[in-house]
Amino acid sequence: MKKLIISSFLLSGAVLLHADSSAIRVNQVGYRPGDIKAAVLMLESPADPQVKIVNLTTDEVFAPDSVVAVTPWDPMAECSRIYFSSIIAPGKYKILTDNEIESPEFTIGKDVFAGLQELPLHYMRQQRCGYNPCLDTYCHQLDGLLVLSGDDDGKHVDVTGGWHDASDYLQYLTTSANAVFQMLFAYQENPEGWADEYDAAGKKGSNGVPDILDEARWGLEWMVKMNPSDSLFLNQIADDRDHHFYGLPADDTADYGWGPGKERPVYPCSGKPYGLRKNKNDSKGLASSVGKFASSFTLGAQIFGSLDSVFAADLERRAANAYEVAKANPGACQTAPCVSPYYYEEDNWVDDMELAAMMRYNATADRRFHRDAVDFGRMEPVTPWMGADSAHHYQWYPFINLGHVMLARQGETPKVRKEFIRNMRSGLERVEQRADNAFKCGLPFIWCSNNLDVALVTQAMLYRELTGDNRFLELETAARDWLMGCNPWGKTMIVGLTPDCDSPTDPHSALSHVHHIPTTGGLVDGPVSAYIFNSLRGVHLEREDAYAPYQNTTVVYHDDNADYSSNEPTMDGTASMTYFLSSLAAGK
């Protein structure tokens, strides 16, 4: 056993405390040998404990590299960051103090993240609509009837397929197109190492195609149905009348005016505010939605060109048309509210057009698309949530601008590349300035804050890879660790992350809560401001809050089915994890 050299906190008042709510938070999956390794000690009362790190595999005991007092997480009295990056030997570890505070076990090893890139695909398959391979049932076979479509109102259009958005069974072009692009991007960036254990229908069995491409194609085929003609782009299936039903999708009895379980309404993309009842959105154009069609179709055509030339050619034709329609109709196209006033309040669109333009440039080498991309990119140099204290629901979506990444890599001149690298850096700097807390978390705690965290990790990784600049490495690592348990609640934010992790056990999902079917791989919404939790309709707790000692007047999280604001898995956030998890698995 190595001799332990104790590091003590630079804190006052060394008293033995009861450790019930004092805690040590770690990345419960683990750390690679070369990672910045940090844990957070949360103390309910002032104290000066001694800290040690034990290799449970060899019984060796280590002192931390440093223990740094930081701004406490209210209601904790004191917090410190425990750094132990010098410990690189593979094994199982635990952090302990002399006053009986212990961390969960964690691993140090070069392959701790191996295989995690497949986890989101489990949830994506479970969210499939039309035919669901996880449940081996068919659902929503009558979709759907057009609404708010003028003379076409009531006309049937076949839009079966795609994914249910979250624990309700609505379907949105906005989130689905982003999910498609994120999975295609993850494959493009990290083509090696994807499994082929499922067929195109999502059933067990290899089909010679990586499972991530099977899943992306499932979404692309649905998007093709949502674009039934060159002039018609569809934006949404169903609305919040769906929320009266809480069961398996095949048993859906929601009634939209045509009888229980019958056809669901299909909303077109609209450049004007709309809604079937008194609640209306604030749509101003088509570019945000139709631009997403263009970028996903273009990347799909590129990737599937060698796998299915006919499918790829159709995607390419649709992409070219979608880009021109989107450019001719600037503005954001929002989803439709109905009974309640909630909808995706996306109000930026130039990021979608920038990405679409760069994808068209890659496909055609036509310099006008490059000029378009630069022009659109200069209209929004930094994704607006970065550095913001609050935002409306999905106000700035997607939460990462991958068009900036494309221009930073492929800009036609060094000046353009430097400009968009600077834009990426500026966003990270703004988040870092807000990260003045024990967990180095600089997010605004809006609804779906975990999606922002995934976007942050993604942008930081891509920036580091592009530039070799490691200045944001701790911010990046802390954001990754946040999702894996190093957060105030000690909860991983991914259902079923690993068997040993403390993951959500009661997410807001009928599959899980009513039918006891695990939503494995799903990313839950994540912590929200106490204001949001207290103001949303229907949000409550079904049992005593096990995390009460760690809630504060500003931010809350509950592992409780009744809290759909913080504990509901979402399809788009889950798909967005495929890039960063595959990059970690690849050792980036």
Image (cartoon, rainbow, N blue to C red):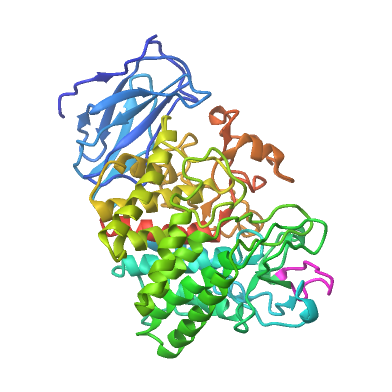
Magenta range: 251-264
Is any atom of residue 116 visible in this view? no
Measuring from the top left, give residue 421's x and y in whole percent.
32, 53
The quarter of the displayed image where residue 272 is located: bottom right
- Left or right, 473 with reference to 395: left
The structure residue drawn at horizontal position 62% and vertical position 60%, both measured from the top left corner, is 511
Measuring from the top left, give residue 145's x and y in whole percent.
75, 78
- Left or right, 257 with reference to 307: right
Q: Residue furthest bottom?
A: 310
On screen, residue 537 above or below 4 = below
Measuring from the top left, give residue 419's x and y in whole percent.
33, 53
In the image, residue 504 lies in the stretch drawn in magenta: no
The structure residue drawn at horizontal position 53% and vertical position 76%, both measured from the top left corner, is 324
In the image, residue 262 lies in the stretch drawn in magenta: yes
The quarter of the displayed image where residue 17 is located: top left
On screen, residue 500 above or below 311 = above
On screen, residue 177 above or below 525 = below
- Left or right, 378 with reference to 258: left
Measuring from the top left, give residue 24's x and y in whole percent.
40, 30
For the N terminus, the image quarter is top left
Q: Nearer the viewer, residue 507 or 36?
A: 36
Does the magenta stretch mainly form a helix, a strand or a loop?
loop
The structure residue drawn at horizontal position 46% and vertical position 69%, both measured from the top left corner, is 356
- Left or right, 31 with reference to 351: left
For the C terminus, the image quarter is bottom left
The structure residue drawn at horizontal position 74% and vertical position 46%, both measured from the top left corner, is 538
